[in-house]
Amino acid sequence: MGVFLAPMAGVTDLPFRILAREYGADLVVSEMVSAQAL
């Protein structure tokens, strides 16, 4: 079973996702979007 990085608003920006992949995360996703922001 692999490591999955859950989406977190304001946290999982590109540099964080790159670090997560370098430290062994098998799957990373972009951050959540607020419905109000759309």
Image: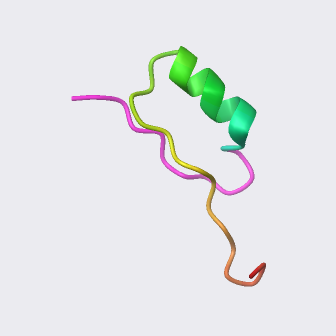
> Is residue 28 left or right of 4 when viewed as pictured?
right
User: In this rendering, is residue 8 above or below 2?
Assistant: below
- Residue 23: say if magenta: no
Along the viewing direction, whichever of 22 and 9 lies nearer the viewer: 22
User: In this rendering, is residue 9 above or below 24?
Assistant: below
Q: Magenta part of the protein: which range?
A: 1-11
Q: Quadrant of residue 24?
A: top left
Q: How many circles with numbers are drawn on the protein?
A: 0
Name which residue lies at 45% across and 26% down. Answer: 25
Colour theme: rainbow
User: In this rendering, is residue 4 above or below 24?
Assistant: below
Quarter of the figure with the N terminus: top left
> Is residue 25 left or right of 34 when viewed as pictured?
left
User: In this rendering, is residue 9 above or below 27?
Assistant: below
Residue 38 lies, in percent from the top left, at 74, 82
Residue 20 lies, in percent from the top left, at 56, 26
Residue 18 lies, in percent from the top left, at 63, 27
